[in-house]
Amino acid sequence: MTYAQLIARLTQYLEAESAVLQGQEYQVGQGGGGRRLRRADLADIRAEIGNINAQIAAAPDNPANIAARSRRIRYLRPMC
């Protein structure tokens, strides 16, 4: 995945985490005709956020990685 795709995916997972924190499960309507919504497990979401952050740190097109590569210092020895 590209850096931009990873950032977009991380944003989605952070939004999912926020939604879960607002309410894990709720029911609309009553009785047998009601609908129930159960959100994803918070632990799973947080684990994937950690995985995505690790992928972002290792992404070759991450601006932080590109800047680190361009700051290499090279020493040349004169040929005598």
Image (spheres, helix red, strand yellow):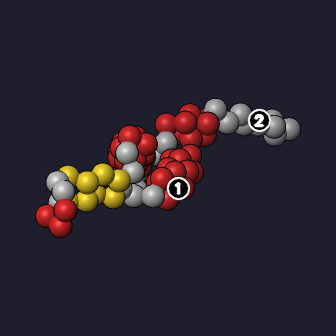
| Amino acid type, callout 1 | Ala
Q: Is residue 46 left or right of residue 71?
A: left
Say if 2 sits above or below 64 in the image. below
Residue 56 seen by the camera: yes
Q: Pinpoint residue 61: horizontal percent, then vertical percent.
A: 46, 46
Question: Picture quarter containing residue 37?
Answer: bottom left
Q: Using a 10 Å C-alpha cutoff, classify the residue at mark 2 as few (fewer than 14 neighbours), some (14 to 19) or many (20 or more).
A: few
| Amino acid type, callout 2 | Tyr
Q: Nearer the viewer, residue 70 or 22?
A: 22
Q: Pinpoint residue 79: horizontal percent, then vertical percent.
A: 81, 40
Helix, strand or loop status at disc 2: loop
Q: Which mark is residue 20?
A: none
Q: Residue furthest bottom?
A: 32
Q: Earlier in the sequence, mark 1 or mark 2?
A: 1
Q: Nearer the viewer, residue 4 or 37?
A: 37
Residue that badge 2 annotates:
75
Q: Residue furthest left?
A: 33
Residue that badge 1 annotates:
43
Q: Residue furthest front?
A: 31
Instruction: Name which residue lies at 39% across and 58% down.
Output: 40
Instruction: Name which residue lies at 53% across and 47% down.
Output: 53
Helix, strand or loop status at disc 1: helix
Q: Nearer the viewer, residue 8 or 44?
A: 44
Instruction: Name which residue lies at 55% across and 36% down.
Output: 64
